[in-house]
Image (cartoon, coloured by chain):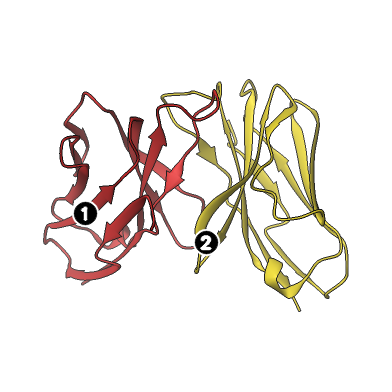
Chain colours: A red, B yellow
Amino acid sequence: KNQVEQSPQSLIILEGKNCTLQCNYTVSPFSNLRWYKQDTGRGPVSLTIMTFSENTKSNGRYTATLDADTKQSSLHITASQLSDSASYICVVSPMFSGGYNKLIFGAGTRLAVHP
Amino acid sequence: DAGVIQSPRHEVTEMGQEVTLRCKPISGHNSLFWYRQTMMRGLELLIYFNNNVPIDDSGMPEDRFSAKMPNASFSTLKIQPSEPRDSAVYFCASSLGGGSREGYTFGSGTRLTVV
């Protein structure tokens, strides 16, 4: 079973609409949870990072939430734009991972924003 | 800063040939990671270097894969001999310290196709 599961696998929305992507994880204890955006043909780019004690973090139109009790995180995108079309990856770092910040990646949600 | 620079961007090679992927991390970053991304398995850590020393190579698939970091500004990932199942996008990432809260910076990747 994957330690980081994301849903939906893919999503299509119209430009200007809002959407929410989900991430459930079993990694425990964990150090931090990150959301990355990966454009086609590019490497992942960090959007937000939250420690286990934080429950929300915003970056422009992107807002991530974290519920450490239920081990769930969400990424909310407001007023979507065509440039938001990308894969969004949830990444969790275990608290104890051999002395470095090992990342455990979800499979990602592929978002397509249509005009 | 030009970010993490990888070369080549695309590589097509015949089965059995040697392939060398190159990475220049961000100046001043002392942690370097090699990842492999496929549709089936997502992003997987291959190897982690700290201060040019390999710390965790447990993700290296088999003896056909080797990685080196001769100095702080250059790393290579070599596959010899290459096989069709090695076809994937290979990413290099760097960070300031293995436990960086700021996250990693990924390169744009090398898309490898082995025919």
| Residue B70 pos. (x, y %) | 83, 30
Label 2 and label 1: CA atoms lie apart by 23 Å
Name the chain under label 2: A
Observer-nearest of A38 and B34:
B34
**Left or right side of B85 for B40:** left
Observer-nearest of A68 and B115:
A68
Q: Residues within 10 Å of mark 1 (few under 14, many from 20)?
A: many
Residue type at tag 1: Gln
| Residue found at the very far bottom of the displayed protein | B115
Q: Secondary structure at mark 2?
A: loop
Q: Residue at x 16, y 31 (%)?
A: A55
Residue matched to label 2: A41
Q: Quadrant of residue A68?
A: top left
Report the number of discs: 2
| Residue A19 pos. (x, y %) | 15, 58
| Residue A12 pos. (x, y %) | 22, 72
Q: Residue at x 74, y 29 (%)?
A: B73
Disc 2 or disc 1, which is closer to the eye? Answer: 1
Residue type at tag 2: Gly
Name the chain under label 1: A
Quarter of the picture holding the N terminus of chain B: top right
Q: Are marks 2 and 1 in contact (CB under 8 Å)?
A: no
Q: Which mark is residue A22?
A: 1
Q: Which mark is residue B62?
A: none
Quarter of the picture holding the C terminus of chain B: bottom right
**Left or right side of A74 for A47:** right
Q: Quadrant of residue B19?
A: bottom right
| Residue A39 pos. (x, y %) | 43, 57
Q: Quadrant of residue A95?
A: top left
Q: Residue at x 81, y 66 (%)?
A: B82
Q: Secondary structure at mark 1?
A: strand
Observer-nearest of A31 and A41:
A31
